[in-house]
Image (cartoon, rainbow, N blue to C red):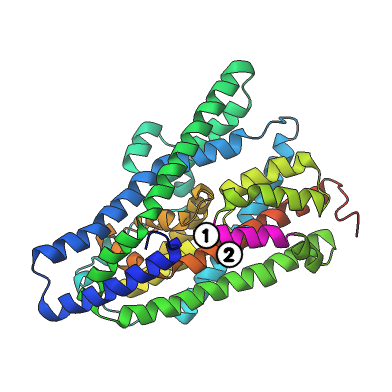
């Protein structure tokens, strides 16, 4: 089984988990073997949560510190952030709207979640309070408490400060965080490789407690996410590209074909970055200066597909739990999904890691969420491939739009 690709391993583990879950559903779950199997899922979720803070911290620092030309930092930085924020918000709104309309999680009842206390859902007092909470009084305390808003703010600030250093201090810190980031990526990849075992435990627990009805909801949820990603990549992004550049978007999509194919096959924005940069420079004719600024940032902070997935995923989870989120609570999901997508490193299944951030923002219990995420993970691989392709397509369009605004001539060879 280890010779199979990861998504096949996960699929097989899901089938085995369903069979084991049915057995325990019929013959009882009060035994040692059941406890051991389900503990695999608990351990996997704890490993995912363990890696969240260092993954966000190092990936953002490296992305921001990679900006070398300080003379263009302000102008390009503002344009880049505005573009990435706007497209991510479009993606989040699509996910939010579709999940509220389709309601893939409505009607699913998990027995263990009947005691969920909706009155304890955490909501911000105002948008200003969210901005204030972004500034941590103690960044180390923010890291230990999992304060993602504070961690993201401090990482961005530190990355900018490192990029403004000179000489050996700049190179020392850049090399340190680059090495740390690579080590964290290796850890994350190792944890994701344990996904089949984790899925086995999570699916066994889900089926033994709730039977098959949740799989119907997950299938409907999968279709909802796929529809949202399709709307974003084939309608929203091309329209935006056409309006901002006055160039036929089909030409751009043809130029980015190899990068899109690489993204789909690897499920990694970081792994696709060299291909994306080559396509943008050679096919679109964008300067190296703009490319080297926008695309590395995009591989770290621009995660349209991930933002859509996280937002829709949390609404789906709330529907499964039987919790109706108010507009204020959904606003919390939107803001946190946007910020969490910024921190999602460009590696396979990073969105899976980040979804716990968004669920925590509205006060969902991790043990409740873990059961549902286990079933979501079973169909996550094709969605992960699709949303990675959405991410790098948005990155390339961002580079083209910003280059056009800087007076560059796109597609000079026709």
Query: In the rendered image, which residue does mark 2 sit on?
Result: 91
Element under label 1? helix
Furthest residue toward right? 413
Element under label 2? helix
Residue 226 in the figure: left or right of residue 291? left
Residue at (74, 68) in percent of width and height = 239
Q: Which residues are magenta?
A: 256-267
Q: Is residue 265 magenta?
A: yes
Residue at (58, 39) in percent of width and height = 63
Residue 197 in the figure: left or right of residue 115? right
Taking the image as drawn, is residue 73 in sight? yes
Look at the numbered discs 2 and 1 and tell me whether their residues touch, using CB distance below 8 Å.
yes
**Numbered tag placed on residue 307 in the rendering:** 1
Residue at (50, 47) in percent of width and height = 343
Residue at mark 2 to residue at mark 1: CA–CA distance = 7 Å
- Quarter-of-image position of residue 322: bottom left
Residue at (61, 58) in percent of width and height = 263
Count all numbered tags in the image, as a single digit.
Answer: 2
Taking the image as drawn, is residue 326 in sight? no
Secondary structure mostly seen in the magenta stretch = helix
Quadrant of the rendering where the C terminus is positioned? bottom right
Residue nearest the observer in this picture, 230 or 332: 230
């Amino acid at each position: 089984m280890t010779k199979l690709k990861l998504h096949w391993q996960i699929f097989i583990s899901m089938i085995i988990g369903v069979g084991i879950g049915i057995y325990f559903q019929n013959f009882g779950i009060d035994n040692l073997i059941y406890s051991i199997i389900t503990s695999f899922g608990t351990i996997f979720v704890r490993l995912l949560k363990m890696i969240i803070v260092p993954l966000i911290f190092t990936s953002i620092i490296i992305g921001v510190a990679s900006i070398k030309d300080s003379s263009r930092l302000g102008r390009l930085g503002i344009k880049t952030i505005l573009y990435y924020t706007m497209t991510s918000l479009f993606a989040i709104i699509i996910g939010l709207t579709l999940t509220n309309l389709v309601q893939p999680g409505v009607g699913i009842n998990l027995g263990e979640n009947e005691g969920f206390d909706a009155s304890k859902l955490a909501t911000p007092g105002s948008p200003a309070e969210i901005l204030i909470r972004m500034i941590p009084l103690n960044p180390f305390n923010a890291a230990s408490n999992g304060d993602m808003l504070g961690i993201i703010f401090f990482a961005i600030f530190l990355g900018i400060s490192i990029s403004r250093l000179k000489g050996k201090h700049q190179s020392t810190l850049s090399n340190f965080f680059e090495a740390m980031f690579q080590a964290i990526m290796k850890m994350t990849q190792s944890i994701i490789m344990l996904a089949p075992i984790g899925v086995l435990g999570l699916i066994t627990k889900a089926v033994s407690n709730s039977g098959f009805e949740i799989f119907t909801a997950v299938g409907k949820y999968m279709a909802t996410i796929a529809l949202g990603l399709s709307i974003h990549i084939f309608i929203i992004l091309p329209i935006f590209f056409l309006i901002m550049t006055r160039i036929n978007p089909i030409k751009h999509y043809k130029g980015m074909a190899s990068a899109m194919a690489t993204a789909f096959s690897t499920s990694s924005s970081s792994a696709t970055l060299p291909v994306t940069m080559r396509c943008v420079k050679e096919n679109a004719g964008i300067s190296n200066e703009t490319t080297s600024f926008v695309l590395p940032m995009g591989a770290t902070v621009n995660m349209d597909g991930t933002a859509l997935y996280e937002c829709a995923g949390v609404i789906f989870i709330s529907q499964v739990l039987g919790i109706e989120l108010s507009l204020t609570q959904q606003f919390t999901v939107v803001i946190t999904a946007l910020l969490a997508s910024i921190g999602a490193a460009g590696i396979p299944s990073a969105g899976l890691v980040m979804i716990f951030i968004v669920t925590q923002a509205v006060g969902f219990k991790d043990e409740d969420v873990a059961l549902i995420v286990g079933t979501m993970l079973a169909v996550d691989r094709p969605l992960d491939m699709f949303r990675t392709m959405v991410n790098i397509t948005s990155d390339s369009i961002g580079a083209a739009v910003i280059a056009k605004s800087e007076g560059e001539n796109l597609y000079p060879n026709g």
